[in-house]
Amino acid sequence: MKKNALFRLATKGDAKEILEIYRYYIENTTITFEYDVPTIKEFEKRIEDIEGEYPYIVCLVDDRIVAYAYAHKVWERAAYQWDVELSVYTDKDYLGNGFGKKMYNILIDILRLQNVINVYGCVTFPNENSEKLHNYLGFKKNGVFTKAGYKFGKWLDVMWFEKAILEHGLEPKPVKRMDELEQERVKEILNKY
């Protein structure tokens, strides 16, 4: 059953609800390689560390956060500043409603405003839902790191997906921080989906 959703930027005050979604994936799946559930304070810090630089969004249904997604720096060196990794998590009870696709599209639209050129997805392999999401949105599989992580008594592969969302010009525009963007334009993107 499709649900109506509202999308907005996350705040540190959303940490508790977001963490409850993420807790399921930590404790029950190999989708994340994290072993221990972070504290609320640790999770608030994670949100704060990202929100000024890149988009961090939540999806609400009936005033409850049911999914979240964010972009973050992939590598540290200056030459990588046009590259980000995307992450999305949906409450297990709301899977299949298309929220992941919508949230990836929102992230990509905002990242274009920021002059980001390359977006990446790092996916535990196999992970059919994530593979379908990346394929649907036009990402191409870039490579597989075999036995890259160990969780729940087994070695797991990691698959990287990539997509260029802007042209690779000879003089790329500087990447803008989230707090440098015109907020009305960001709101338009959030309301578009």
Image: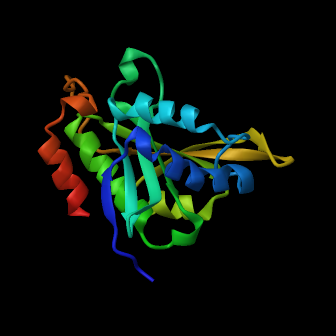
Q: Position of residue 2 (x, y in %)?
A: 40, 79
Q: How is the image coloured?
A: rainbow
Q: Position of residue 160 (x, y in %)?
A: 55, 44
Q: Position of residue 108 (x, y in %)?
A: 31, 48
Seen as rendered, the residue at the extreme top is 78
Instruction: Name which quarter of the figure residue 146 lies in.
Output: top right
Quadrant, the N terminus:
bottom left
Residue 125 in view of the camera: no
Residue name at image x 48 percent, y 24 percent: 75
Judged left or right of residue 16, residue 119 is left
Q: Judge whether 180 appears above or below 104 on screen.
A: above
Judged left or right of residue 129, residue 74 is left
Q: Position of residue 18 (x, y in %)?
A: 51, 50
Quadrant, the C terminus:
bottom left
Residue name at image x 64 percent, y 49 percent: 124
Residue name at image x 37 percent, y 49 percent: 57
For the residue pair 34 and 165, the one nearer the viewer reads as 34
Residue 68 in view of the camera: yes
For the residue pair 185 and 76, the one nearer the viewer reads as 185
For the residue pair 92 and 12, the one nearer the viewer reads as 12
Residue name at image x 20 percent, y 46 percent: 186
